[in-house]
Amino acid sequence: MEHEEIIEEIKEVIELIRPYIQRDGGDIEFIRFEDGIVYVRLTGACVGCIGLEGTLREMIEDTLLERVPGVIGVEHVEGV
């Protein structure tokens, strides 16, 4: 699978996850995909939330690992 195809699949999965994050007042933004790692930024109510790490690992990372070949992990990027 080409790098750009993987990125498109990642973005599609993020769009599936987004409503669940928005329901709690947060949002998710795709930053980049590099060396198997998806970099995302969680914003809104996610900033400073004690559940951020759980959301990142249990919802976002697990879903991407399951649905997108080539993804080996997810990292959160802070700031602008």
Image (cartoon, helix red, strand yellow):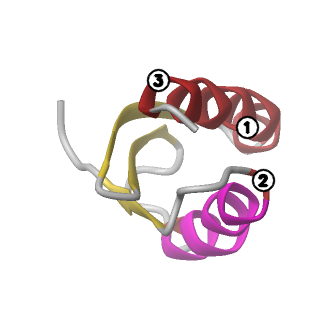
Mark 2 touches mark 1? (CB < 8 Å): yes
Mark 3: amino acid: Glu
> What kind of element bears circle 1?
helix
Crowd around label 3: few <14 · some 14–19 · many ≥20 (10 Å): few
The residue at 53%/44% (across/down) is 45
The residue identified by callout 3 is 4
- Tag 1: amino acid: Val
Q: Nearer the viewer, mark 2 or mark 1?
A: 2
> Which mark is on residue 67?
2
| Residue 17 appears in the figure | yes
Q: Position of residue 32 (x, y in %)?
A: 33, 35
Q: Which label lies toward us, 2 or 3?
A: 3
Cα–Cα span, label 2 and label 1? 8 Å
Q: State whether residue 53 is above or below residue 33.
A: below
Tag 2: amino acid: Arg
The answer to whether mark 2 and mark 3 are in CB contact below 8 A is: no
Query: Could you tell whether 6 is left or right of 79 in the image?
Result: right
Label 2 residue SS? helix
Which residue lies under the disc numbered 1?
13
Residue 26 visible to the viewer: no
Residue pictured at 51% horizontal, 30% vertical: 7
Q: Position of residue 78 (x, y in %)?
A: 23, 49
SS assignment for the magenta stretch, majority: helix
- Element under disc 3: helix
Determine whether, in the image, residue 47 is placed left or right of residue 49.
Answer: left
Task: Tell me the distance, in whole angstroms, between the alpha carbons under discs 1 and 3.
Answer: 14 Å
- 72 over 63 or under it: above or below: below
The residue range painted magenta reads 53-66
Above or below 45: residue 76: below
